[in-house]
Image (cartoon, coloured by chain):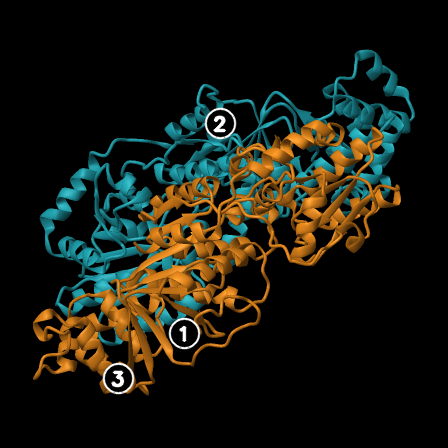
Amino acid sequence: METQTLIESAGIDSHVATLARLLGPSTVLTSTGALAAGADPRAVLVDVLSQPNERAVWLVLAVLQGEPPTSDDVVRWRRRIELEGATHVLAVLSRGSGQKVRIIHGGVVVDAHHTLATTLSTGIQRVVRNVLSRWHATQKYSLVAWDRKFERIHLMPPGSHAGARVSAPVDLVSVVPWECTYILPELAVEAHRLERIQAVAEFSASRSAVIGFDTVPMTSAETCGPGMPGAFARNLAALTHFDRIAAISDASAAEYEGWRTMIHSAGLLGPEILSIGLPLVAIPTSAKVIDPRKTLGLDGRPIVMCLGSHEPRKNHPAVLHAAELLWREGLEFQVVFCGGNGWGSEGFEHRVGELRSGGRKVSTHTRVPDATLSALMREARFSIFPSLSEGYGLPVAESLASGTPVITSNYGSMAGIASHGGALVVNPRDDSDIADAMRKLLQDDELVERLAAEAAAVPTTTWEAYADELWSFFVN
Amino acid sequence: MSDRDEVDFAAVLRQRLTAIAGVLGATAELQAEIADAPLRDVLVSVAGLARTIGGSAPSWLLFVAVTGCFPIPDEVEDLRRRLELSRTDIEAAALTMRGTRTAASQRGVWDKPMRLVTDAMVIDVSFCAQYEHNTGIQRLVREAMSRWHAAGRAIEFVAWDHDTIPRSLFPEEVDRVVNWADPARSRNEYVRTGEAELIVPVNTTFFVPEVPREPLCAPLEGLAEHSNNRVCAIGYDAIPLVSADLVKQVESERFSRYLSFIKYTDRVIGISAAAAGEFRGFASAVRAQNLKGPVVVEVSLPVDLPDATPRRGSETELPLVLSVGSHEPRKNQEGILHAAELLWADGVEFQLIFVGRGDSGWTVPFDRRLAKLRKAGHHVESRRTASDQEVSHLYHSALVTVFPSLHEGYGLPVAESLAAGTPVITTNYGSTAEIGAAGGCLLVDPRDDASLLAAMRTVLTEPEAVAKLENQIASRPRRSWDDYALELWNALEDVSVA
């Protein structure tokens, strides 16, 4: 449905009338979609429920109980209707208080719960905020989030995606998406939320669509902290009922396609998967002039910049090892790591300590503001990002968009970005390959200049174009 | 276990270092030289060999010899980098000891010599060797291993010692794997005679036919990724990942850790086409990381022909509908009960028995419902602790077995029921559909109660339909455990499959 109607209903009689109108056959409706005069809404609803119809059960539960049900709820109540009769079960369900609900009928619903609940702006949140900022300006949709217990959906103020502060819902009325397009632009890993999202995808007569970032917790669980692989598996189970996944790169699409092959054994077909690559954009800058060396306490030696949190997948111990090999050769440079401490970074930190006490110039920085990062990226001789697995590899794109050469992995999304020029690609599992590339860029000024020129010539793309393409895949 | 005070730790370390020296390329001259040298010099020579060769495999082996435990992948990388940064063999030895001392002190086994196995397939049968338990996985392992053992194949069974390193089996454990049914063997899990030695596979095949416990996944990953062995595994299913909505989250989490090991294996043998499809899908997903991923081969489990025991009527006057399987949402017992209630309401009379244990969170409310139905006059019960004999008796007594599971790697109750000559109503996709394709089964959509209801009604009300299914069972192609054991061996050894 193209257009969106918000139907508000309060009180059991109003709920039953609304449900009869939405679920009843055309024979009991007028040409404007109202219930025909003389039609008894309760009788219409009993007729609808007397045939096995899990979508109808989903909507009846969502409206009469004031919260979107789980798939288990739907099956359980459908069975109860089959055993006890629709009249009786509808009477049982009508004992509730009939609290007000808001049915979003048709159009687009965007569930950005996690992004709206934080002011952080790392990886996924940056994607969500940039996409929503474009959609906010150009498209019509309802922005929603969940309550604390993930039992109800609430309408959020339009434009509350910016992240300057955590937003409160418009009001506490329970929202019911029906016959619409339900879009999940973020990674949802909350088990209770996923239970109900899965039922929305399965039963709400809506098209459901999601951005697929990567499947790292499935394909590289050894690089994830405790809890994530299990939570991510629950996410994937919900996605089996979705209609569309927009993967952020070809590599990510290949991962999701592998997963879709796996679910055939459970008699499931899974969603359509399309690769829509993230844009190639620079880190946002500020008008203020920043001297990154002064701000971060760096000396005049050439800077090798390594952006990303310290987690096993990012392969930072290999960067340290390659750097040590080159320091031993007598090369002069400093390695600057910018990124938070992820899970499993003890070995990395220990090694940094060893190298520093051996007099090596290596520094680690956390919570560096975007403007400083951007200035540092431009100041660096080159950046290095030899990750073992990435859905996209934002720092590679950011380096190129800043006109800074980058060393990155010779496969997957990173190689895809590097193919535009301005990069050297290496086998990230081979320390000497990494060291060779670093040596070249430290010693060969002409090569650095050529790659920098290539990087500067790489056509950047925009968040706007990405968001438009996404909308068109999800909605049109 | 021997008294620790009597162990000469230095002699143990010397034995291990000497054992790996040859693999690391020590000349006969050097080997003779270190035989009499002080331990310190042996260590310097062997660490020096690993340093000279470079790469992960020598680091993996050196780590195992020095610590007495299998390293996780990061530990191998760390030692490899330390050796690479060493300027002399003495420095290599010092950095090796420094870099491995945490692992050695926390997980190392210090009191056992080490035997390198190069000419036999090393098979990890940890669970079957140590525990008196025999359901799904253990039955497969014991049926196949006893046949390989009897055929005199070049195999070496191992079990993990305190989750740190594989060791040889005690004689009681060997019996527990290959002579399970022998009435004379010891059933006591605590009886062990003799001594075990540590087993280190070198340049051979390491085979994991069980699903390893979580603590073993990281060291197995280290073995598969960094040692020079070929590592193979049996792939049972990917239920905790694919059907994460039907299992506890902790199971999905554990399974993901297991997949980190599978990712680096060379070959996975799926127990059905459906299971093989799951592991193939996973292998194709990891190719995005520029890894080969395992080659996946399918060797389906056998379904034995009906045994000699004749089928008999039910214990009561009523036809028996049987449901066997652990009690959990995935097995869809709720769907069976719902269909049964609708049939009872229609006046169809039959007895329904559920067999299988389960989490009390699921079984207690379910059994309460069964009690209510019994009060209403219906013949329905659950048997949570039925013995093997009792289950076999029920299979032979039932009119039909109902197994509309939402997701299976294989579906043992389907095969067991067919082996008893009893028709089965089961799921129309995945592994159960594969078994059903050869006859004797009515296939239904387990997500559609109406489909299950219709099949149950057919079996209960149309004797000719049951007769037809019984005839199909009799003419199913024969496939035995002998066939399976042979095909499994060939699937592991056939290097032309890639």
Of the numbered discs 1 and 3, the one sitting upstream in the chain is 3
Q: Which residue is mark 3?
A: A94
**Viewer-side label of 3, 2:** 3
Q: Secondary structure at mark 3?
A: loop
The residue positioned 71% from the left and 48% from the top of the image is A376
Chain to which the residue tagged by mark 2 belongs:
B
Position of residue B461 relative to residue A429, above or below, is below
Chain to which the residue tagged by mark 1 belongs:
A
Q: Secondary structure at mark 2?
A: helix
User: Could you say where residue B407 lies in the image, as x and y percent from the top left?
Assistant: 35, 50
Residue flagged by tag 3: what amino acid is it?
Answer: Ser
Label 3 with label 2: CB-CB less than 8 Å = no
Q: CA gap, disc 3 to disc 2?
A: 66 Å
- Crowd class of label 2 (few under 14; some 14 to 19; many from 20; radius 10 Å): some
Residue flagged by tag 2: what amino acid is it?
Answer: Trp
Mark carried by residue A155: 1
**Viewer-side label of 1, 3:** 1
Left or right side of A247 for B303: left
Chain to which the residue tagged by mark 3 belongs:
A
Mark carried by residue A328: none
Q: Secondary structure at mark 1?
A: strand
Q: Which residue is mark 2?
A: B148
Q: Which chain is cyan?
A: B
Q: CA gap, disc 1 to disc 3?
A: 25 Å
Label 1 with label 3: CB-CB less than 8 Å = no
Q: Which chain is orange?
A: A
Q: Quadrant of the C terminus of chain A?
A: bottom left
Q: CA gap, disc 2 to disc 1?
A: 64 Å
Residue toward you, A231 or B126? A231
One can see residue A152 in this view: no
